[in-house]
Each structure stands twice: as structure tokens, then as C-alpha cells.
Image (cartoon, rainbow, N blue to C red):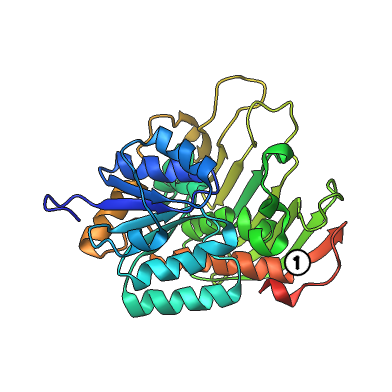
């Protein structure tokens, strides 16, 4: 932190494009981007063109040993995010990972231990919540009691494969973690957030490869049925089947059922209407409502800065951050394997 109290941050590992959203949200929050390190020169060149204020660090160590840096952000290869976060925390810095921030139970145990030992923040940017205006607005409605007590969530996370642009690690199960671990962690976090649950049981889960036999380790479909510790249910479906005819990468949706009403989010598109995303529809005892959420404030970055300065948990409780990944990992491990996938769980993946 500089002598004016401004939080200073750096990026290490920029293998996924989400690093740009992570960087932007911190800049919007008033933090100062100091430096960046990546092994891949092409990715580094692209990042520094976008953010010329970032000095290119000579090594990861140069950033970790810079006492003026408060926070490290990363979208390094999925399986490398937790080990990096551990190194960051042991160097006295806070950490914000792209999702999934953890890809195995052994990583989860190690991250929990080091976070408790150091007291540092280990945040995972679940962007389909924190950087999605309609989801943020839905949270305000739910927590104000607008639809009564939440009794079910349905989270849908379709994506487009864009196969030619994907690096090799996207198709290696041990490196990307599986579809529920990866994409499904978004929906797990939202289930916990909207229901207020502290834990949940995975009642049923399955993963499959139905369309991409040329990539035998790619899971292109997954779904999960959950029941929380309070008896609330949740359903999650994620896939890589977005057709080319859709006007964006995925028709992500969320439905929240309450005792006094319900909410539907059309997060990224409103099919055939050509009016963009951020649509929120809700119905309660007072009537039918629609909100365009384009101008909803996104507080996550600002709250994270506050937490870094004040050692609080306003952006996201640390336990919810970890529990979302725990549920995703549990569902992934228990999943029935279908289609072109091998039928057995490989213990080497954990």
C-alpha cells in the first residue's frame, strides 16, 4: 500500500481472458496496477498493450518479494491457481484468482490451512455473480424479502467451445479440473449466496462428453442436484453446446423460487430480441416486474479493496468462497461419467 493508502496490485499468470475483467474491476475500485509477470510472451504483450502502466516483472519472485504490493490477481492455468495462491499468501499478500480457484481436494485442504495460518484473503472472482449486474440486483431483491424465503435455485451455464482458440490445457482433465469444477463453481457460489446455506449435499451429478470424441478428456456437459443443510434444493447445468447462431457466448440464466414469488435472470442475451443482456424478471404478490440492470452498481472490487485495508470480509465471506469450490469438487468426483468419457474416476486427478 502506498503512502496515500491506495491498494497496489500485480498480475501473475494471465492464461485466461478473465484476467482483463479482474484487472478492470480493481482499477474501477481505485487500486493501482503495478506490474505483471507471465511466461507466455504473446499473452504478456497483449496485456501490456491494454495496460501500459504495468511494468513487466523479471520473475514471479520479483512481485512476491515487493513489499509495496498488497494483492496479486491471476488467471493462470486452472490447476496452478491454488499453488500460486499459497505462495502469494505466504509472502504476506492477498490473492484474487479467476474461477476455479482450486481444482482438487488436496489443494483445497492446503489453501484452507495456509489461509488460516496467514490471515490473508483468498478470493475467487465468481464473475457470473460479482461482475454480472442482473445477478447483483437479484441478490438485493432476495435479501430484501421481495420473494419470501428462497426454496430453490436453478443455475444454467452454457458456453461456446471456440475450439480453434483454446490452448492444449483446456482439453487435459488434470489441468482444467472438469466442467463442474470449472464452470459449475459459479453456480455453486450463487446457490450458497441466494439460499443462505452453509453447506449442501450432492444428491446426484453427472458429466459427459457427447460431442467431442476427438478430445476424450473434455467434459462438455455436467449437471448437479443439491440439497442444502436447511433443506433447500438447487439444480445446476453447465455445457459447451452454445450454437453459432446465438449472439453471444452463452445464454446464462438463473431462476430463484421463493415462497412469495420468483425471479428469472436472462444474464447475457434475450433470445431474438436484440436488446442485449442484464434482464431481470420477477413476480411476487404485488405483481409482475421487469428491470433492465445495465446500470446496477458492481461493488465486489470496491469491497475487496476495503477488506484488504481493514481485514474484513465484505466482498465475500472466506468460508463461502471455499465452500463453493468444495461443492463443485464433490459433485465432480461423485459424477456418473457418460458418453465418450472413461467410466472410472481417476485418483490421479486429485
**Along the line of sight, which residue is nearer the eye, 198 or 7?**
7
**Along the line of sight, which residue is nearer the eye, 283 or 186?**
186
Q: Which quadrant holds residue 107? A: bottom right
Residue furthest left as drawn? 3
Q: How many marks?
A: 1
On screen, 143 above or below 197?
A: above
Locate residue 247, reporting x and y percent: 65, 26
> Does residue 196 appear in the picture of this structure?
yes
> Does residue 227 appear in the picture of this structure?
no
Residue found 71% across the figure and 75% down from its top? 348
**Along the line of sight, which residue is nearer the eye, 132 or 113?**
113
Which quadrant, please, contains the C terminus?
Answer: bottom right
Q: Is residue 162 left or right of residue 274?
A: right
On screen, 23 above or below 178?
A: above
Locate residue 76, reporting x and y percent: 52, 55
Residue found 64% across the figure and 46% down from its top? 157
Residue found 21% across the figure and 62% down from its top? 310
Residue found 50% across the figure and 59% down from its top? 195
Residue furthest front as drawn? 58
Neighbor class of circle 1 (other Cα within 10 Å; few <14, some 14-19, many 20+) is: many
Residue named by callout 1: 335
Locate residue 254, reporting x and y percent: 58, 45
Locate residue 131, reporting x and y percent: 45, 42
Which quadrant, please, contains the N terminus?
Answer: bottom left
Q: Secondary structure at mark 1?
A: loop
Amino acid at each position: 500500500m502506498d503512502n496515500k493508502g491506495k491498494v497496489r496490485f500485480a498480475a501473475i499468470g494471465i492464461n485466461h481472458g478473465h484476467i482483463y475483467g479482474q484487472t478492470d474491476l480493481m482499477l474501477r475500485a481505485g487500486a493501482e496496477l503495478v506490474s505483471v509477470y507471465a511466461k507466455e510472451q504473446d499473452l504478456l504483450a497483449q496485456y501490456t498493450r491494454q495496460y501500459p502502466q504495468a511494468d513487466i516483472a523479471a520473475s514471479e519472485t520479483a512481485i512476491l518479494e515487493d513489499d509495496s504490493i498488497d494483492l496479486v490477481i491471476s488467471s493462470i492455468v486452472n490447476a496452478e491457481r491454488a499453488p500460486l495462491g499459497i505462495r502469494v499468501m505466504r509472502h504476506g499478500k492477498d490473492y484474487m484468482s479467476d474461477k476455479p480457484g482450486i481444482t482438487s481436494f488436496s489443494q483445497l485442504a492446503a489453501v484452507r490451512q495456509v489461509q488460516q495460518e496467514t490471515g490473508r484473503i483468498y478470493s475467487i472472482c465468481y464473475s457470473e455473480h460479482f461482475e454480472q449486474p442482473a445477478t447483483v440486483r437479484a441478490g438485493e431483491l432476495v435479501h430484501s424479502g421481495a420473494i419470501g424465503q428462497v426454496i430453490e435455485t436453478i443455475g444454467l451455464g452454457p458456453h461456446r467451445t471456440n475450439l480453434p482458440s483454446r490452448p492444449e490445457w483446456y482439453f487435459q482433465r488434470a489441468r482444467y479440473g472438469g466442467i463442474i469444477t470449472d464452470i459449475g463453481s459459479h453456480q455453486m457460489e450463487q446457490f450458497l449466496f441466494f439460499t443462505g446455506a452453509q453447506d449442501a449435499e450432492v444428491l446426484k451429478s453427472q458429466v459427459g462428453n457427447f460431442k467431442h470424441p476427438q478430445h476424450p478428456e473434455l467434459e462438455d456437459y455436467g449437471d448437479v442436484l443439491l440439497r442444502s443443510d436447511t433443506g433447500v434444493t438447487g439444480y445446476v447445468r453447465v455445457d459447451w453446446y452454445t450454437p453459432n447462431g446465438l449472439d453471444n457466448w452463452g445464454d446464462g440464466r438463473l431462476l430463484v423460487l421463493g415462497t412469495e414469488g420468483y425471479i428469472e435472470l436472462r444474464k447475457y442475451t434475450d433470445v431474438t430480441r436484440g436488446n442485449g443482456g442484464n434482464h431481470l424478471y420477477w413476480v411476487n404478490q404485488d405483481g409482475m416486474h421487469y428491470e433492465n440492470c445495465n446500470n446496477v452498481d458492481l461493488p465486489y472490487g470496491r469491497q475487496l479493496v476495503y477488506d484488504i485495508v481493514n481485514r474484513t470480509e465484505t466482498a465475500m465471506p472466506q468460508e463461502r468462497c471455499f465452500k463453493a469450490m468444495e461443492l463443485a469438487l464433490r459433485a465432480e468426483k461423485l459424477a456418473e461419467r457418460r458418453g465418450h468419457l472413461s467410466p472410472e474416476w481417476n485418483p490421479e486427478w486429485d
